[in-house]
Amino acid sequence: MSYMSSSERVIKEDNVMFKKTIVKIPSESYVNGLTTSDLGRPNLEKALEQHKAYIEALKKCGTIVTEVPGNLQYPDSTFVEDTAVLTPNFAVISNPGALSRNGEIHDMEHVIKSFYESIYYIKSPGTLDGGDILQIEDRFFIGISARTNHVGAEQLKTILELEGYKGTIVELEKFFHLKTGIAYLGNQTIVVAGEFVDHPEFNKYQKIVVPPEEEYAANCIRVNDYVIIPAGYPVTKHKINDAGYQTIELEMSEFRKQDGGLSCLSLRF
Ligand code: CIR
């Protein structure tokens, strides 16, 4: 693999270079959130420790972190990624597909408005979770999942095209969200697992393939000079390091129990 100079990187990797991030502290109701996993009930104290380490990692990557206080009314609201799609010039407030999560957008809208003048909205009957959206340079992949429907996906595609981006809609087979199984590291390189390993839409990228037993590690995030990955997935970590990226490993056990991955815990812009 060839490496680019730092000035080339800034141009080619603008969607993995971030100045700011937004997170939301897990509230006491976090343990009552939605889940399909059989990993047991999360431990709140441990979740808070892991969340603190997540914030420290975002700071180490050089971002200014806005910490939104927890909201008891919304157990899953620490998974802020699902509430919006952010770009350098505009924000799209989503319309989360799970009824118990839909109201999460109100706290987040307030915060996002402090950073953006241009804001679009996904509107019912369209639904969309930010976890289903992956940006690779000027193209956004939009996953159709149990949370994001065709109407929501088409609304986002229209907004993106209006703003000069491209949108590609991808039907998910098994993954919960699109980003459960794919991440973009910049430099045309993706981390892929499961149904995305041989997916035709992703064939043109250089692939770091996550083995089935490490599938959870496919949800990692490139933030400036680092790739943040969940701890405990050595094969994936080595492959990412071999591709030339520095990694930060974070314990994610208490978020995994609620079907949450690394990307879900922040909005990056
Ligand atoms: C949910 O079911 O909505 C939460 N328990 C987990 C959301 C994870 N978010 C994401 O993958 N973007």
Image (tube, rainbow, N blue to C red):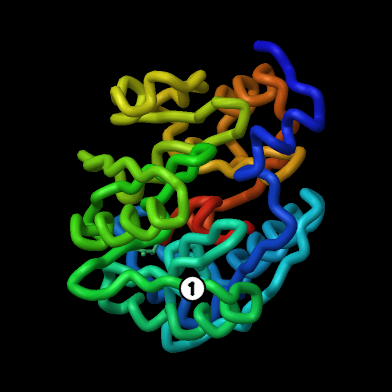
Residue that badge 1 annotates: 119
- Residue 68 as seen in the image, left or right of residue 151: right
Query: In the image, is residue 244 above or below residue 264?
Result: above
The secondary structure type at the circle numbered 1 is strand
Query: Which quarter holds ligand 1?
Result: bottom left
Furthest-top residue in this view: 1
Residue 260 lies, in percent from the top left, at 45, 56
The crowd level at tag 1 (other Cα within 10 Å; few <14, some 14-19, many 20+) is some
Q: Kindly identify the amino acid type of the residue bearing the numbered disc 1.
A: Ile
| Quarter assignment of residue 27 | bottom right
Q: Which residue is drawn at the image coordinates 30% and 47% (left, top)?
A: 143
Q: Position of residue 172 (x, y in %)?
A: 24, 42
Would you place residue 1 above or below residue 256 in this image?
above
Determine the residue positioned at 22% across, 75% down.
124
Residue 256 image point, x, y percent: 46, 53
Q: Is residue 230 visible?
A: no
User: 16 or 22: nearer the eye?
Assistant: 16
Q: Nearer the viewer, residue 32 or 80?
A: 80
Q: Position of residue 8 (x, y in %)?
A: 74, 29
Give 189 or 87, whichever is nearer the viewer: 87
Query: Quadrant where the N terminus lies?
Result: top right
Q: Is residue 221 left or right of residue 19?
A: left
**Residue visible at 73% across and 18% down in the picture:** 3
Point out the image quarter for the C terminus: bottom right
